[in-house]
Image (cartoon, rainbow, N blue to C red):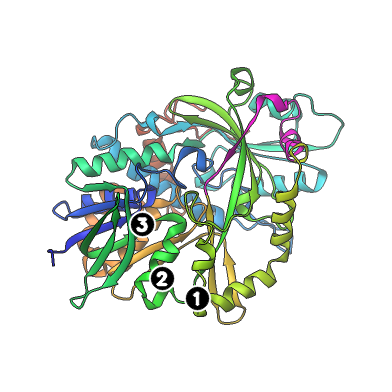
Amino acid sequence: MSEPVDVVLIGGGIMSATLGSLLQQLEPEWDIKVLERLDSLAQESSDAWNNAGTGHSALCELNYTPEKADGSIDITSAVKVNEQFQLSRQFWTFLVQSGRLPEPRAFITPTPHMSFVWGAGNVAYLRKRYDALRDHPLFAGMEFSDDPEVIRTWAPALVEGRQGDEPVAATYAAAGTDVDFGSLTRLLTTSLVEGGAELRTGADVRSLKRAEDGTWVVRGKQRGEKFELRARFVFVGAGGGALTLLQKSRIAEIRGFGGFPVSGEFLRTRNPEVVGEHHAKVYGKAAVGAPPMSVPHLDTRVVNGEPSLMFGPYAGFSPRFLKNGSLFDLLKSVRLHNLVPMLQVAVRNLDLVRYLLGQLVARRSTKFAELQAFYPAAQPGDWEKIVAGQRVQVIKKDPEKGGVLQFGTEVVAAADGSIAGLLGASPGASTAVAIMLDLLEQCFPDRWAAWEPTLGAMVPSNGAPLASDPQRARELMVATSQALGLDDDGGDPGDGGLRASA
């Protein structure tokens, strides 16, 4: 049998690219191989048109700031997500400044983030949310208005053609971003290969088996030819396909996990006149019973240098775990150990089931009316439907409830740290660096202390939350904004879009 390689990364998306990039800086002598089942990289969830491209930092996403029973706003999740995105920005800055990533506009564009609501109750909620965030160092510069004329200056499409006197409100954060994660994945992987890693496309992993010496035997087919590798460490970053591959590894830690696939659609326009009317990512409130990933939003997108607008998502159902997967993916993932959790989740989430069924049978006119609630002047002829990537939400065993549906991400790693994978969906891509740092600490505890000085240079706030140090937060946010070219689209020069509050 061949000598084992140090690292095998299964899946050619943003997670494998991020983990590989971190490891190559930490252990430049390690042999890294990337295996992607399709013929090119980032064709599933990382592709620009398979996700919303939001640099998730909770500047606009209302699901991260729930209203508690006493009427106050819980900002805990918002702060956590923002902290995680700052780590991504810091790592990208390091790679740009060290020449490992090219001109940052190839993957990131300054794009204001807005929340927009209507109705007296929602306006009151948004004002309380703004009051809870406005003085926090990670949300400096956020603005609030319930004046339609002020909102018009931020995003005229939200106001033009709006009828009646229903109250509206919005928050505006100039420091937001649009990220092309497909482009970023390809750039990171190109840098990996230039640093000595090997990329194999068309390599479909079929088997993961632990060898007697503790290494992993990775078997599959590459364009019809069988291949076999041995690896000291395996990362399964295969998106929706990660669950079944981890099940094939038979590690004890995957027992009890299942997956609930959710598909989605967006409406997109490339009409220059329409695109020119709106420059922001605008998030609203989710419908009752809708999953967090179905929060409606009207987004500016910049893909391959071309701006467009995208609205959605409209949720749907497919048993596939990957956009290019099999109709039998869901069925093949069922095991005795996850059957009860999956059934319990089905029983406890009837609102979600009803919501998905409603989305499946909704007429085009009904769906378009949801866009017009954001953009009253929208015309059907300007918009086309695109199909988003598959998302597989995590189902996990719960000692009290039997099973719970989780809408975040979950790292599943063997006790000895020799294999790990990532399950789940949003806000994964934006927080990839934070997730992969947690994975590295969990899987390589014996190396972590030695790595910390290097990590400190790449991601300065790792282990030192910015929320507790306003001055350091501002310094790092301004520095990354300047390095990534994000300080020239709103706000004072050099302030990274951190505008003074109105």
Alpha carbon distance from label 3 to label 1: 28 Å
- Residue farthest along the front direction in this orientation: 224
Name the foreground residue: 228 vs 278: 228
Q: Earlier in the sequence, mark 1 or mark 2?
A: 2
Q: What residue type is disc 2 on? A: Gln
Residue 383 within the segment the image draws in magenta: yes
Q: Which of marks 3 and 1 is nearer the N terminus?
A: 1
Verify CB contact (< 8 Å) between mark 1 and mark 2: yes
Q: Mark 3, mark 1: which one is toward the viewer?
A: 1
Report the residue marked by disc 2.
247
Name the foreground residue: 368 vs 211: 211
Find residue 47 and name its label. none
Measured as percent of width and height from the top left, residue 430 is found at 45, 47
436 to 248, vertically: above or below: above
**Residue at figure coordinates x 64%, y 51% from the top left:** 316
Report the residue marked by disc 1.
335
Report the residue marked by disc 3.
436
What residue range appears in magenta?
A: 367-389
Measured as percent of width and height from the top left, residue 39 is found at 34, 43
Q: How many labels does the image show?
A: 3
Secondary element at image label 3? helix
